Amino acid sequence: MTISEELRKRILAQILNGDSYKKAGLDNCVGVGTCFNIVEEERKRTLDFDEVRRFMIAFKKHKLNPFDAERVSKFAELMNDFGLNFNDLQDVYTVAKMVLAEKIYSYRSLVKQLSFIS
């Protein structure tokens, strides 16, 4: 069976957007193996196919759009200007959460003390 270019593009679009081979096959009336072969052919042509797929799935999961990608890129450039990377950002986030938790605990303790006064 020969697969039309239109059908091949539809299947690839579904796979890139996070659908399984099974779902893409069912939606397009082809077998899972056909979907797999289409993706394998594309992987040979597009070496970063899997990275693009992960990127697309992450965008879909977090309800982002292409403009958000540009913002993230600019943010990464700014971080780079300060000598930081995304791992550093995770460390900063973790420390900020700990500081915030400590402040919340302090405020709760203060509220408890004040409630005993009244």
Image: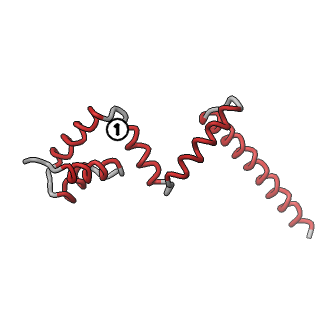
Q: Which quadrant of the structure image shows residue 91?
A: top right
Is 46 in front, or is 30?
A: 46
Amino acid, disc 1 = Phe
The residue that appears at 68% across and 29% down in the rendered structure is 83
Give x and y (percent) for residue 114. 89, 64
Q: How is the image coloured?
A: secondary structure
Is 117 in front, or is 104?
A: 104
**Outermost front residue:** 5
Q: Is residue 99 left or right of residue 85?
A: right
For label 1, the crowd category at 10 Å Cα-Cα, with few meaning under 14, some 14 to 19 and many 20 or more, is some
- Reply above or below: 53 against 14: above
Kind of element beneath mark 1:
helix
Give x and y (percent) for residue 31. 14, 50
Q: Quadrant of the C terminus?
A: bottom right
**Outermost left residue:** 1
Give x and y (percent) for residue 79. 66, 36
Q: Is residue 81 left or right of residue 110?
A: left
Q: Which quadrant of the structure image shows residue 34?
A: top left
Q: Which quadrant of the structure image shows residue 84?
A: top right
The residue that appears at 82% across and 56% down in the rendered structure is 107
Is 67 in front, or is 114?
A: 67
**Outermost top residue:** 83
The residue that appears at 37% across and 34% down in the rendered structure is 48
The residue that appears at 26% across and 32% down in the rendered structure is 44
**Outermost right residue:** 117
The residue that mark 1 highlights is 49
Is 1 in front, or is 33?
A: 1
Give x and y (percent) for residue 4. 16, 50
